[in-house]
Image (cartoon, helix red, strand yellow):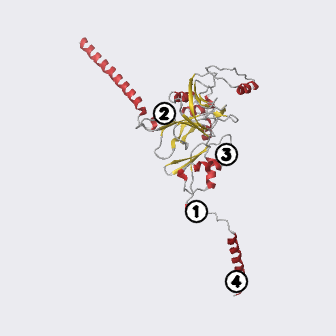
Amino acid sequence: MFQHHGKIMKTMLSISFFAVIRRHRVLVLCGALWSLPALAAEDLPVGHYALPETGNIVGEVYSVRIEEGETLLDLAAAHGVGYEEIRHANPEVSIWAPDAGTEVTIPARYVLPPERRDGLVINMAELRLYYYPKTAEGETPTVETYPIGIGRDGYDTPLGVTKTTMKLKNPAWYPPDSIRQEAAEKGEPLPSVVPAGPENPLGDRAILLDLPGYLIHGTNRPDGVGMRVSHGCIRMRPETIRALYTRIGVGERVNIIDMPVKIGGDGERLYVQSFPLDGQEVGMNDLLSALQKTPEAGGIPLDYTRLGETLKASGWQPIALAPLPEAVITIEPEPLRWYDAFRSWQQSLETSRVTPEREGS
């Protein structure tokens, strides 16, 4: 009897063991499905989006509630947005001491830059990087987007197309003489070399660009991501630079732009997204430049007064452009030519001659 019971126990243990193995295989298989073209949007990592078949807008705006002890920047990091983005989306919420249970808007809807979708596109005005990884045939093309920190006034990053040249793990930092002098004037002298470690402002990963002295790197101060705080380099949060580091190759295309207004299409509607920094408003010239780069906007009648109002209200989030119905468009009259003016003057004379006769009749 006991022997029979032992066989039963062995059988049950074997079944349990194989069940665990099978469950583990299912989990592994689910992990493998992560890269299949039929992947649902909600299964993608934060900041990853399938490229839309039509239009050029990805992501969505949604809301979450703050838990006890969380800061607004904690939420920003968890949801892939930067300091300026989260601050503009939640102007009434305290950055460092929000009340638990406060509803916070996550502005994770983006107009893709009107640039070639290859490698990295970095929009300095937006404080955001877009990465278009190469995809195999049959796979759905995707885009990844991450907040960045950029150079403060006087330390602008050069614009234009360049490429990656080298990747460094645990890099040492060799501060240039200008930065060492600036630090010394503040009473915070810097050594000629800052080794890898928690005091290194480059973090633990760096990607060098074909622009002498400029890098995309991590940081030991992630709260500064989404601000203008660097000396011209492009800062990323430690976890995001690590995610890119393993996949970006040497020689990858990098397009650095400065586009303070973007126009995007989503179905039949157009949206404007602007990025005012330091209290400075974005001008109409920036909007008109963005419209010129948007073929979908051609032929659509627009009320420029309302466009200006929309531009002021669209800080960091896409807002629908309001086209003016053709029926109420007011067409400005053409300037009068000299003979038109003469004809008008002649008609006024004739009217003045016949008017008294009409009044006396």
Amino acid type, label 4: Val
Q: Amino acid at mark 2?
A: Pro
C-alpha distance separating marks 1 and 2 = 46 Å
How crowded pointer 4 is (Cα within 10 Å; few <14, some 14-19, many 20+) is rated as few
Among all residues in the image, which is located at the extreme bottom?
361
Looking at marks 3 and 1 on the same chain, the residue that comes earlier in the sequence is marked by 3
Separation of residues labelled 3 and 1 (CA atoms): 29 Å
Q: Position of residue 244 (x, y in %)?
A: 53, 30
Q: Position of residue 80 (x, y in %)?
A: 55, 34
Task: Identify the residue under disc 2.
Answer: 45
Mark 4 and mark 3 in contact (Cβ < 8 Å)?
Answer: no
Tag 2, which secondary structure?
loop
Which mark, residue 328?
Answer: 1
- Residue 25 lies in quadrant: top left
The answer to whether 31 appears left or right of 341 in the picture is left
**Mark 1 crowdedness (10 Å alpha carbons): few <14, some 14-19, many ≥20:** few
Image location (x, y in percent) of residue 351? 70, 80
**Residue at the disc numbered 3:** 281
The mark total stands at 4
Cα distance between the residues tagged 3 and 4: 57 Å
In contact (CB < 8 Å): disc 1 and disc 2: no
Q: Earlier in the sequence, mark 3 or mark 4?
A: 3
Left of 287 or right of it: where is 12? left
Q: Earlier in the sequence, mark 1 or mark 2?
A: 2
Q: CA distance from mark 4 to mark 1?
A: 37 Å
Q: Which residue was labeled with disc 4?
A: 354
